[in-house]
Image (cartoon, grey):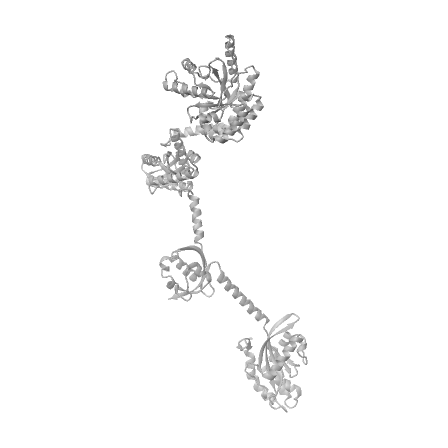
């Protein structure tokens, strides 16, 4: 339609129609001036904005209605002109007489109002009755009151339409209103588009104001063609909450944040880059002025503004920092963990290679720390660990790294050393500092540590190798008495390799049938008869040969293999003792030496009962041998299990009596049957008055409690006679016999008893003691 003229009512009249009035009004007046009777010269365009086509239409209508004569040609010319104008109009043009009947209309009106729009029809042919009545009322109002503008509804088969209608009264030459010209425009799509636009703007504004992050739009400030600053144009509600900045719209950014360019230059440079290059950028940024972390997105709008959206991620960054710290630090002490120690060791090695110096890795393990946790609780244990960590820090340089590897083990990375002696000096300093007493809960706790040292480049080039060798050296320090430090050497490596080989073989020994039991006779001094035997476990390794118990029993206890091995010993000893009963050795029974690891098992008493049932051995022919320390530790649950076995008739003996936590109370509580005097008191009994006094006291105490006493490690006649003189009941040792295979032991007993019987000796009946060690 081209340029339009705004109407006060809010819709626009095409300028073409307004211009047409100026051109055609004169022609209409000239054409109609010669007509007989009244002319349409009185047609007026009240208030402006009605097209000349309406005036021309009225003139043609009046001319056609009753004017004929010499000016018919002019009227026909004007009709043709109207037809051309009306046909080109996009607005619906229609003319009604005073009675509301349609007289003229253009194609746009037919398209809008439908096929009911014909000459002579009224509004009832165009729309429902109620709408028709309302339209007729508006026509009458226009006839009476002049030009009017209305918005109204037109119901069509396709649905309701919204129309904007201008109604203009038409006058004859005498100024009498003879009809109404209507100019209608379909506003349905325009209103829908306007509504959609308003809704879209409302949604965008709601989104803008309710975004989780802050948003700001900035007007770039240019000087000499360069962006030199920005001005705030708009901010959303979250902007203030995210930044704490208020009343910034309309102000320059450098006015609100004067130190921005100096302290946050990267942010300013990013903003300028986005405006000049047009490429959006997104990044995390620590806003130094505000002291917060933000996730920032910058973009340039189509009209050249800088848009910035941002969200405070300080809490997330803090959490990430904590997670990262936890990933590389120990939770209890805050020290670097093993992962970070590995990285620091790699750096120390690289520095040593560049500088021609040395680096060392120290492995420190607290001695006996498990007892602290078990006796005083983990809270006290944690306090000790933190205290040790603080002391270790005091002993190190700024360039060194202290790490907690876990439990009671620490790693120490020493850098820039000139020789191994520097590492040993630091180790000695550490040991002295750690050994100082801790005052915890009114207790003076003393801790010691063992340290292993591996030096780069002598002992290795990488962390894994150095750690392995430092760990080996640490265990060597423990083996040599603890509370000391040791450098790694290859002999340690060979010992560790042998230990690993032994450990691997032990796991398969039971399945391969490499174990066997030997039995050492025990003699009753009063009768001279063999009344029992201690069963000793032997391991025949396929490559190493005979492995002594002192080498593999501690390893079996450490790895837990002692449980299945001990069960096997119990089963075999019971079977063998039952067999001896069937072979006529009625005075011979069996007992099993128990490990603390076995007693910790809830089903231990069931294991013993099952072995007795399967073997058919009478329970009173089995004696279980325990050490004093096993009975004292966690006594209550063990007391219950042992009490159940005592109820079956199984006998109990205390091994190595006098070397542990000797207590008379547990002898009574556990209903012990026999005390075994340790060989350390027996070996020099004939020549050592102190040992003599101890053995005498043990024997007297045993008899006073109704117990029997047996001495082990008897190797000379003098010791045997002294024990007899002290009243000892039984003896065991090389003087009588070495440990023997089962068949050799049975033959030994038969021969010995035969010799006694031939001499008329009595045969007492006491159980044999079987020992897996």
- Which of 218 and 670 lies nearest the eye of the viewer? 670
Q: Residue furthest front?
A: 704
Number of numbered markers: 0
Q: In the rendering, at what x and y percent does residue 731 appear?
A: 45, 17
- Which of 489 and 108 lies nearest the eye of the viewer? 489
| In the depicted structure, whether residue 553 falls above or below residue 178 | above
Q: In the rendering, at what x and y percent does residue 580 appear?
A: 55, 17
State which quarter of the image contains the N terminus. Answer: bottom right
Residue 688: quadrant of the picture = top left
Q: Residue at x 44, y 44 (%)?
A: 327
| In the depicted structure, whether residue 667 falls above or below residue 410 | above
| In the depicted structure, whether residue 244 falls above or below residue 418 | below
Q: Residue at x 55, y 28 (%)?
A: 606
- Which of 695 and 326 lies nearest the eye of the viewer? 695
Q: Is residue 76 visible?
A: no
Q: Is residue 189 visible?
A: yes
Q: In the rendering, at what x and y percent does residue 665 appear?
A: 45, 27
Residue 189: quadrant of the picture = bottom right
Q: Residue furthest top?
A: 759
Q: In the rendering, at what x and y percent does residue 259 appear?
A: 36, 60
Residue 58: quadrant of the picture = bottom right
């Amino acid at each position: 339609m081209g340029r339009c003229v705004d109407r006060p009512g809010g819709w626009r009249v095409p300028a073409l129609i307004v211009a047409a009035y100026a051109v055609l009004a004169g022609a209409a007046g000239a054409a109609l001036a010669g007509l007989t009777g009244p002319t349409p010269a009185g047609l007026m365009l009240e208030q402006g904005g009605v097209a000349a086509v309406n005036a021309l239409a009225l003139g043609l209508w009046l001319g056609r209605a009753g004017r004929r004569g010499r000016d018919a040609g002019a009227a026909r010319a004007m009709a043709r002109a109207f037809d051309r104008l009306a046909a080109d109009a996009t607005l619906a043009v229609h003319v009604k007489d005073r009675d509301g009947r349609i007289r003229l209309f253009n194609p746009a009106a037919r398209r809008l109002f439908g096929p009911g729009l014909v000459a002579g029809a009224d509004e009832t042919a165009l729309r429902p009755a109620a709408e028709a009545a309302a339209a007729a009322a508006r026509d009458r109002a226009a006839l009476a009151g002049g030009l009017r503008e209305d918005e109204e509804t037109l119901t069509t088969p396709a649905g309701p339409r919204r129309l904007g209608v201008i109604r203009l009264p038409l006058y004859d030459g005498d100024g009498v209103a003879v009809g109404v010209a209507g100019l209608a425009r379909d506003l349905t799509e325009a209103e829908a588009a306007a509504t959609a636009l308003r809704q879209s703007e409302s949604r965008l504004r709601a989104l803008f104001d309710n975004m989780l992050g802050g948003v700001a739009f900035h007007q770039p400030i240019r000087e000499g063609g360069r962006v030199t600053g920005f001005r705030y144009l708009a901010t959303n509600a979250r902007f203030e909450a995210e930044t704490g900045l208020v009343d910034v719209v309309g102000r320059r950014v450098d006015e609100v944040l004067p130190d921005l360019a100096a302290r946050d230059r990267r942010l300013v440079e990013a903003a300028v880059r986005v405006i000049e290059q047009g490429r959006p950028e997104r990044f995390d940024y620590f806003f130094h002025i505000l002291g917060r972390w933000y996730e920032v997105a910058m973009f340039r709008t189509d009209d050249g503004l800088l848009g910035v959206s941002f969200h405070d991620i300080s809490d997330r960054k803090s959490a990430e920092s904590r997670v990262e710290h936890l990933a590389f630090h120990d939770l209890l002490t805050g020290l670097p963990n093993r992962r970070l120690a590995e990285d620091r060791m790699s750096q120390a090695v690289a520095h040593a290679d560049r500088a021609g110096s040395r680096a060392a890795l120290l492995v420190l393990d607290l001695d006996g720390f498990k007892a602290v946790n078990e006796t005083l609780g983990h809270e006290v244990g944690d306090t000790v660990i933190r205290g040790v960590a603080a002391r270790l820090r005091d002993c190190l340089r700024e360039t060194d790294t202290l790490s907690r590897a876990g439990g009671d083990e620490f790693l120490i990375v020493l850098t820039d050393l000139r020789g191994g002696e520097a590492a040993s000096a630091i180790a000695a300093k550490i040991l002295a500092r750690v050994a100082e007493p801790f005052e915890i809960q009114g207790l003076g706790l003393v801790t010691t540590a063992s340290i292993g040292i591996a030096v780069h480049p002598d002992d290795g080039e990488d962390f894994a190798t150095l750690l392995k060798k430092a760990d080996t050296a640490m265990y060597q320090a423990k083996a040599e008495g603890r509370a000391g430090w040791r450098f790694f050497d290859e002999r340690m490596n060979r010992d560790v390799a042998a230990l690993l080989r032994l450990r691997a073989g032990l796991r398969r020994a039971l399945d391969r049938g490499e174990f066997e039991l030997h039995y050492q006779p025990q003699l009753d001094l009063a009768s001279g008869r063999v009344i029992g035997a201690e069963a000793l476990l032997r391991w025949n390794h396929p490559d190493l040969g005979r492995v002594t118990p002192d080498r593999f029993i501690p390893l079996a206890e450490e790895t837990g293999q002692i449980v299945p091995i001990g069960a096997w010993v119990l089963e075999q000893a019971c079977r063998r003792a039952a067999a001896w009963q069937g072979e006529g050795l009625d005075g011979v029974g069996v007992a099993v030496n128990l490990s603390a690891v076995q007693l910790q098992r809830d089903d231990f008493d069931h294991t013993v009962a099952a072995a007795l049932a399967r073997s058919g051995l009478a329970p009173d022919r089995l004696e279980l041998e325990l050490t004093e320390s096993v009975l004292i530790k966690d006594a209550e649950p063990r007391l219950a299990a042992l009490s159940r076995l005592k109820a079956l008739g199984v006998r109990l003996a205390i091994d190595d009596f006098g070397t542990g936590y000797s207590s008379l109370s547990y002898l009574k509580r556990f209903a012990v049957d026999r005390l075994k005097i340790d060989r350390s008191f027996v070996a020099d009994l004939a020549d050592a008055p102190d040992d003599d006094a101890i053995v005498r006291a043990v024997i007297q105490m045993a008899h006073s409690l109704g117990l029997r006493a047996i001495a082990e490690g008897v190797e000379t006649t003098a010791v045997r006679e002294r024990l007899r003189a002290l009243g000892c009941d039984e003896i065991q040792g090389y003087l009588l016999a070495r440990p023997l295979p089962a068949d050799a032991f049975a033959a030994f007993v038969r021969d010995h008893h035969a010799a006694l019987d031939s001499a008329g000796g009595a045969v007492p009946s006491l159980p044999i003691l079987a020992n897996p060690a």
